[in-house]
Image (spheres, rainbow, N blue to C red):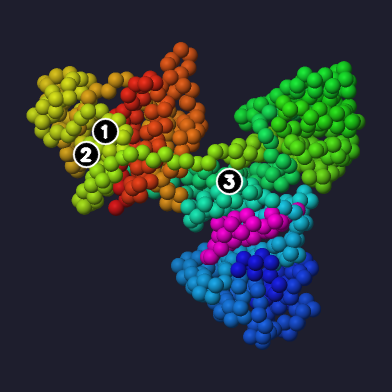
Amino acid sequence: MMKALLNPEKIAVIGASKTPEKVGHEILSNLIDGRFKGEIVPVNPTTDKVLGLKCYPDLKAYGGNIDLSIIVIPTMAVKSAVEESLAANAKAICVISAGFKEIGKEGEALEIELAELCAAKGARLLGPNCLGLINTHHSMNASFATHMPMCGGISVISQSGALCTAILDWAASRHLGLSKMVSMGNKADLSETDFITELRHDDDTSVIVGYLESIDSGKEFIEAAKETAPIKPIVILKSGVTKAGGKAASSHTGSLAGADVAYDAAFLRSGVIRAATFEELFDYATAFSMQPLPQGRKVAIITNAGGPGIMAADAVELAGMEVCALAGSSATALREKLPAAASVGNPIDVLGDADSGRYVDAVEAAQGDDAVDAIIVLLTPQAMTKPAETARAIAECTNQKKPILVSFMGGADVMPGRDELVASNLPDYPSPERAVGALRAMCQYAEWLKLPKREIKSFDVDKKEVAKIIKSHAADGKNQIGEAAAKEIFSAYGINIPAGGSATTADEAVALAEGIGYPVVMKIASADVLHKSDMGGVKLNLGSADEVRDTYEGMMESIQHLLPEAKLDGVYIETMCREGREVIIGMTRDPQFGPLLMFGLGGIFVEVMKDVAFRLAPLTETEAMDMLKSTKSFALLEGVRGQAGVNIPAIINVIQRVSQLVTDFPVIAEMDINPFLVGAYGEKSVAADARITLEL
């Protein structure tokens, strides 16, 4: 069915128009001007000829079968046109017309009806409310965009028709070829997942580029991307935020998971390269489509001016790559070719009066040096600079074994050189920083491709005990699992907890404390008191029966006064834990992508600095370690300035166990272990406080 959409032989345009600037006229004109090789069937009951083609009042009058139907008529007539198209055996329908779910419930109901009609006949629906589609390799411009792009290897899928036109205009200005361009509109049927899957097998597509405002099925998207990314890069510009960021959260994890961290985690898992801006979207796409991937992060910079070279070097280091020196033999050979004043360090400065020959010498030296993984070439316009000649010379000496990214800085003076670069498949950027950004994306993708096969560790746990606790809370309509029961759940999954228990009277509290052994901690037990410390609901280092009794009575009285509506279930008493590094391990369940795990250091690092990392569950040991390393404060766990490190394997173990827990029990909506106290390597680490929220 996708063949009928992307490579049709017969296209009907329902709503073809004689009037220039009407959408039906522009689509028909684009098909003709694009030299579509198949048959075009205009449909309009008010005329018998449009743009030199015979026009039919309806498809029944045409009498033949069609592959693709393009519908551009008033909204209320669209359903009839869809039925007419299906009767003509159309296997793909593109509804350009607007006025569907974007305007409200009535439009949404009609949109659903169109999708159901197509599904019943085994046809695929693109749109509604879209720009159309283009396949340059099939000479098909079935859109109302202004430009028919050149043939190329970049395929674009977009939820925004306006962005499609911007992309087409940008590609035309840079003489950049595209393969497919698909405007998905409202995605009543066909979505990004369908097109990523289809383009995976498309020989004319080398890079998939997408603009998305939402993803309809997170799990299906991840599976499709994971299957496609090893074959060809996927670069996505995602706007907007997840629904998870808009709902009230009862856990630290839920409140910190706002914005669209779930998309970041999903893209990381599936190998999708995320672009933050429109410029990055095509900075990355051009690099991927034109150059080989780097084998490492060592970068050689070639420049004819010191300042830009320093800018590039700074950008390389800040991007987590290395400005590497040429090997001794390479540097010696290059020094013999360049003027005495030139520098063969890194950046390699070929001087302001450099001709194309000096650039070639430097590029060839870097290409042949095993210490170099990638090359960035900079040029600024001097009086003696010949940008076009230099661009051609660089292109002719490249061997396509290492990526070469170029920044010809300036405007009119360097434009002839920039045009030559694009024509020679050398990606060109207006600034060193943008070239470095594209190279960083290439490095990240190359490293993702080298990751070992994911193996999820399965722990021996007591699922029955957890199921019993959850069932009991659900039966009572309790969506909040307090500390005592939450710790029982974590204990059932092999996570260490301090010795402790619940008490509902002062006498019970004393007896429990005596049994545990002093000193102890007392915490209020109530689902209505979420931030216990703020309410005076946590007391540390209680060292005697009198302290326990007095604290119990005082705590119950003061909290009842502060929160008169709160239901107090007594207190939780546990042994006073030895000091350790406080970290937080949590989970919130994203509506699209499922359980989203969080890790961060406790205290100021999570409350003020929000230095946390998120990953999707389930996750591997390597992914858990990467999660820790991605926080700015990871060095504190390793140990700095004479301070001992902590038991990092214990943190990784608990993250994996939590991952298994929340995967096993989808009813868990949110949870925190805060803090998880981590001692030195070899010492016991414990969940000092815990909270779980259920989705009932």
Tags 2 and 3 in contact by the CB under 8 Å rule?
Answer: no
Q: Residue at x 22, y 28 (%)?
A: 499
Q: Residues within 10 Å of mark 3 (few under 14, many from 20)?
A: many
- Closer to the N terminus: mark 2 or mark 1? 2
Question: Amino acid under label 2?
Answer: Ser
Query: Gap between marks 2 and 3, in whole Å?
Result: 43 Å
Q: Which residue is mark 2?
A: 526
Under circle 1, the secondary element is loop
Question: Amino acid under label 3?
Answer: Val
Residue 604, label in figure: none
Q: Residue at x 88, y 33 (%)?
A: 356
**Is any part of residue 279 visible from this angle?**
no
Instruction: Please state if 604 lies on the left or on the right of 355 as rendered.
Output: left
- Closer to the N terminus: mark 1 or mark 3? 3
Under circle 3, the secondary element is loop
Indicate whether 555 appears above or below 240: above
Q: Residue furthest left?
A: 507
Under circle 2, the secondary element is loop
Q: Position of residue 519 (x, y in %)?
A: 20, 20
Q: Quadrant of residue 67?
A: bottom right
Q: Residue furthest top?
A: 642
Q: Residues within 10 Å of mark 1 (few under 14, many from 20)?
A: some
Q: Which residue is mark 3?
A: 272
Q: Position of residue 458 (x, y in %)?
A: 39, 40
The N terminus lies in quadrant: bottom right
| The magenta segment | 177-205
Q: Residue at x 25, y 28 (%)?
A: 498
Q: Which residue is mark 1?
A: 532
Instruction: Please state if 477 lies on the left or on the right of 87 as rendered.
Output: left
Q: Quadrant of residue 469?
A: top left
